[in-house]
Image (tube, helix red, strand yellow):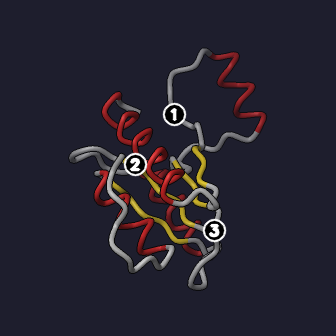
């Protein structure tokens, strides 16, 4: 994950936890550089390549939850991320790629069926 993507994700998580404190949003730490030993341990513990960056653990509108992949600018999903997206959708989850704070807010508000005025960024 790039520094810009990390900053965007941190801002999105902060906003979501402020706007929707009763909904559980958490990160899935699959990215980052790790040594061989740590990478091996994490793989054995269940880390899975391609899994989205964030998960909103709230069922809505027939979906079991919302996976969110964060991308900045023209960043593209890897083939393994696209495979995960298909698997998540097939399993009854909603999946979104968000490239900005506004897009993240719109995605979460839409998913949670919030038709009120958007809560402003922190």
Q: Name the side, left or right, on which 48 lies relative to 16.
A: right
Q: Residue at the far right: name it.
A: 45
Q: Quadrant of residue 89?
A: bottom right
Q: Which residue is nearer to you in this view: 8 or 63?
A: 8
In the picture as drawn, the residue positioned furthest to the bottom comes out as 62
In the displayed structure, does residue 109 sit left or right of residue 88?
Answer: left
Coordinates of residue 102 in the picture (x, y in percent): 28, 58
Secondary element at image label 1: loop
Where 1 falls versus 112 (above or below)?
above
Disc 3 crowd rating (10 Å Cα; few below 14, some 14-19, many 20+) is some
**Label 2 vs 3, first from the N-terminus:** 3
**Residue in the foreground of this view, choosing between 58 and 14:** 14
Quadrant where the N terminus sits is top left
Disc 2 crowd rating (10 Å Cα; few below 14, some 14-19, many 20+) is many
Q: Residue at x 47, y 73 (%)?
A: 111
- Badge number at residue 31: 1
Give the mark toward the camera: 3 or 1. Answer: 3
Q: Which residue is mark 2?
A: 70
Q: Which residue is mark 3?
A: 58
């Amino acid at each position: 994950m790039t520094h810009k993507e990390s900053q965007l994700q941190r801002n999105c998580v902060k906003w979501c936890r402020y706007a929707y404190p009763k909904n559980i949003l958490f990160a899935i730490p699959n990215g980052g550089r790790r040594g061989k030993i740590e990478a091996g341990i994490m793989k054995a513990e269940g880390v899975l390549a391609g899994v989205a960056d964030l998960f909103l653990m709230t069922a809505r509108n027939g979906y079991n939850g919302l996976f969110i992949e964060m991308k900045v600018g023209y960043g593209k999903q890897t083939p393994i991320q696209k495979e995960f997206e298909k698997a998540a959708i097939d399993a009854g989850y909603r999946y979104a790629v968000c490239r900005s704070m506004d897009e993240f807010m719109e995605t979460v508000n839409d998913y949670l069926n919030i038709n009120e005025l958007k809560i402003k960024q922190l």
